[in-house]
Structures are given as C-alpha cells and as structure tokens.
Amino acid sequence: MKVMISFSNKLMQRYMPDPYVLVVILTFLVGGLALLLTPSTPVQLLSFWGDGFWSLLTFSMQMVFIVVTGHVMASSPFFKKLLGNLASVPKSPGQAIILVTVVALVACWINWGFGLIIGALLAREIAKKVDGVDYRLLVASAYSGFIIWSGGLSSSIALTIATPDHFTEHLIGVVPTSQTLFSSFNLIIVIGLIIIVPIINRFMTPTKEQAFIIDRSLLEDADAMPAATVENVDMTPADRLENSKILSLLIGLLGLAFLGYYIATNGLSINLNIINFLFLIIGILLHKTPKLFLEAVTNSVKSATGIIIQFPFYAGLMGIVTASGLASVLSDAFISISNENTFHMLTLWSAGLVNFFVPSGGGQWAVQAPVMLEAARDLGVSLPKTAMAVAWGDAWTNMIQPFYALPALAIAGLKAKDIMGYGLIIMLITGIFISAVFYFL
C-alpha cells in the first residue's frame, strides 16, 4: 500500500498541470476531433466556440454561490464552536479518522462547498487535540467526504436538471429530485459510501511510529473571527448600519419567510436556486451583522476563482460539441459498445475518465450531457439515471483530482501530493461498489 500511495503522489505531482491549462488543451483536442469527424470547417468551429463561450453565465454564477455560501456558513462563529466541541470527542487516532470522515461525508451531502471547508477545519481542530494522529490521512479523510457530493443536496447536475429553463431541458425535460437524489439507486450509493469510506480510512491508519505528526503550533488560527460587536465610539450612521444586528435579522427573517412560502406552495421540490438561497440566508443570520457577513464573503470568494475563469471555456466546448454535430458522432460510437444493461455503468466510467481533463461537475455536464443524453434516448434507458451516472463518475475520480481539494489543502497547509495517495485507494474500492450499483440496479 505504501508503494501505491507513493507512486500515485509522484505521478500527480509530475504530470498534473493547472486545471486552466487542461481546459485549454481540451479545447484544441475537441476542436481537432470535430474537424476530423464532422463536416464543420475551421471558421465554423471558431464561430461555434465563440458563440457558446458565454452560454453558461447563469450556471456559472450558481456554482460560484455554492462555493461562497458553503464557505461563509463554515466560517461562522457558531460552526467554529461546534467544530471545537466535536474535536474533543475522539480519544484515539482511529476514532479521529472515523469522525472526520463521517462529518465530511454528511456535510458534503448537505452542501459540497460547506463540506469541503468544514472537513478541513475539523481536521485542523482534531490534530490540535488528538495525540498520534496522522495529519495527512486526517486531511485526506476530510477530503474523502467529497465523494458523496454528487448524490447530495448541492449536486450541480441533479439540481440543474430540476431547474426550469436549464440548458439540457430540450433533451431531458425538467427532472424532479425524486427521480435523481431521492431515487432508490442513489440512496443506496449514498448510504453505502457513508459506511464504506470511514472503514477504508480507518484501515489506512498507520501506527503511531509511522504517523506524520504535525507541529500543533503551526495550526494555531492566526486569523480568528472578529468580534460580533464594535465599540460604540465615534461611529457614523453608516458604521451603525454596517454593524447592525437588526438589519441582518430582518433580512434573514424575510428570507426564511420566503422559504416557508416556497415549501408550502411547491413542497420539497428543491433546485439549485433554492439551495443557494437557503445557505445565503443562514450565512447572514449566523454572522449577525452585515459587516461580518461581507468579510466572510470576501474571504470565501477567492475559492471560486477557478469556476469564474474556467466555466466560459467549458461553455465554448459545449458550443463546439453540440453545434458541430460531434455529439451525435460520439453518441453513435458510444451506443456501438453499449447495451441496455451496461450503458449506465459505462457512462459512469467514461465520466470518471473525462473528469481528469474537465475537473468540474458542472463543466463536465456541459460537455458530456449532449452526448450521453442523446445516447440514452436512442437506447431507451433512463435519462435521470444517465445524468446521475455522469454525476457519480465525476465525484468518484475526484479522489485523485486535486482541483476541488485546493481550498481544503489551503486550510490544512498541505499539498495535493500529501493526500492523493490515500485518495487512490478510496477511488479504487468505492469505484467497485458504485459500478456494481449502476450495473445490477
């Protein structure tokens, strides 16, 4: 196992370029394939790319809000205190590994941006209090919870196709979450991973002599949250408004009232906009004043820079794939090696492979949706299950894809090479389980 972990870390560190570089390379690769396999001319492909470049602006902003609202909630004083209390629960390294894994899994199921930050923060707190725990495995365990996000409440694919006017509505329609997130096959995967992943991480726990022990002085939080109130000295009217708890309470209550109205009129039919709205309101209430809330937002926005820059390139890719006819060509090729029994499992594997080159669930859906949905419709198999196969494929191989690990690694003070070896073991074992569910169910 040590050899496998070492090999995986060296491979990733040496050959994994920046995600922006990957999407640029993929742009030229897809353009070349379209030029070879379709009757499109270079000028037409250039037009397809440019015309599609800004087609996902709404979707991009929704993804940015997923990251920001999750980060804002996790950085609130309430959740920081909660994490400190949780970190006092485990009394041994094994218990610490299991606890951080379970918390990360549940938190990522609720909101993937929230889960990534909560997991990393909890790992730091536990490392301060539990003797002998391997810090690298602790952070890897926190990141391993991310494997569940695509089947959870912030799943970009499931929530996107549940939102009216989404970009694949002409292929799949508006799909309620009862057919995706709360379907029997998805719940089986979620429950199975909540059981399997902590066991995997526990078995990877090294002996105390072999453990990587972090210097606790390095983990002291230098940027503690500012006080919830400020001295009432020489405050201007503007200062008083910015530090007003009443304003945050009023807008928070207004938001909760709308959410109550929405549930009363629509039931529990959640979508991406409602999830973002819910966590935005909770963040406002937890940070108590407009000033503290905006400071938390400022600190969290930097985590969304990759989405802001890369999503237009994904939209350009979608423009090439769809407008050139390359989607139809690829669909025909995919159908030739698939049948009704193997289609969803092969979709899972293909999505896992594409994820190495398109490290974004939303971006990957933008690229793969036209291909996979067309193939699924031609074969007569479930379209919602096809969408979830793409979603789980992306989440599955994220265990050795460092793009989404970067915010957690920044909090933990580690590099991707420190945790990706553990991620490889998690990916291999969970891949067998997830594949079996898509094949047999």
Image: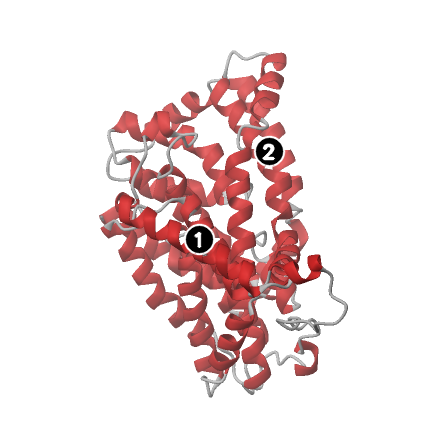
Tell me the number on the disc at residue 312. 2
Tell me the number on the disc at residue 254. 1
Along the horizontal axis of the image, is 19 left or right of 186?
Answer: right
Residue 228 vs residue 413, the one in the foreground:
228
Q: Amino acid at mark 1?
A: Leu
Q: Amino acid at mark 2?
A: Pro
**Residue shown at the point (66%, 77%) measured from the top left:** 219
Mark count = 2
**Spatial distance from mark 2 to mark 1, Cα to Cα?**
34 Å
Image x and y of residue 350, in percent: 42, 40
Q: How is the image coloured?
A: secondary structure
- On screen, residue 388 above or below 218: above
Of callouts 2 and 1, the N-terminal one: 1
The quarter holding residue 218 reads bottom right
Other-residue count near label 2 (Cα within 10 Å), few / some / many at <14 / 14–19 / ≥20? many
Q: Residue furthest right?
A: 234
**Residue shown at the point (61%, 71%) measured from the top left:** 228
**Residue shown at the point (56%, 24%) measured from the top left:** 52
Q: Secondary structure at mark 1?
A: helix
Image x and y of residue 77, in percent: 56, 72
